Amino acid sequence: MVNPRWCQYLCGAIALLLSSVPAQPVAARQRSPIAPPPTQPSPIRPPTTCPTELEPLTKALLRDLPSYINRLSHQRSNQFPTYAIAATQPNILPLPVVSNSAIDPNQGGLHQVFFTVLEREYNSKKSTTYQHYHWLFLAHTQTSGWQVATLYSRRGFYPTNEQYASPLRETTQELTAQVIRRWLRDCQAGAVQISN
């Protein structure tokens, strides 16, 4: 048997709840039109274009080179890690190349860049600071963009003294050239910020 008093309380509670909900006009109950999605989402950073001119390209490259060297160096399993500290501004004035060299500087699209990277190597007992002198040959084509043709390097202690300086040798397959290739790939993909 249902208690009539209980039914009164239940009906009163329902009426109280319904009276506290504001009535919406019919126009407000209709769905508002959905805004069309934007045709292109706005990027976090606008895409950039890799420079076709040598000077802005090499300035941006050498600005980023120490961090690229450090990332790639630490991805390798080196017993004694090397840290790139700084890179100099590029020198893009070409030098005459000996004719028996593997590189022909008169070949179309080849550009010479000279720069130095200051690096510190840590071993179990001490740290040693080196300067790496680099002579980079870059090739530029309309279809492939910028490519590393070859890289020559030599290493000396820092601060400079006559104690040790290695002879100039080809380092096209070594860390710095690999880093430059990776940076050029990122630049051509529009992932590098180029300053004006």
Image (cartoon, helix red, strand yellow):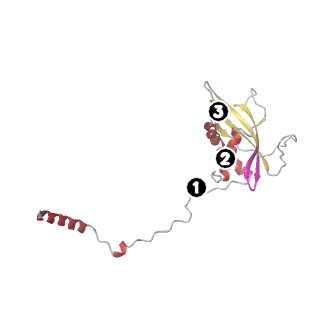
Amino acid identity at mark 1: Arg
Please say whether residue 105 is one of the residues in the magenta stretch: no
Nearer the N terminus, badge 1 or badge 3?
Answer: 1
Who's the residue at 21% across and 66% down the image?
14
**Which secondary structure lies at badge 3?**
strand
Q: Residue 120 carries which label?
A: 3
Who's the residue at 71% across and 47% down the image?
58
Magenta stretch: give its range. Answer: 138-149
Question: In whole angstroms, how far apart are the C-alphas of marks 1 and 2?
Answer: 18 Å
Left or right: 26 with respect to 97? Answer: left
Q: Mark 2 points at which residue?
A: 183
Q: Where is residue 181 in the image (x, y as percent from the top left)?
A: 69, 45
Label 2: how many Cα within 10 Å (few below 14, some 14–19, many 20+)? many
Who's the residue at 70% across and 54% down the image?
51
Question: Is 81 situated above or below 107?
Answer: above
Nearer the N terminus, badge 1 or badge 2?
Answer: 1
Q: In which quarter of the image is the C terminus?
A: bottom right
Q: Where is residue 59 in the image (x, y as percent from the top left)?
A: 69, 47
Q: Which mark is residue 45?
A: 1
User: CB of mark 1 within 8 Å of CB of mark 2?
Assistant: no
**Which secondary structure lies at badge 2?**
helix
Question: Is 46 situated above or below 114?
Answer: below
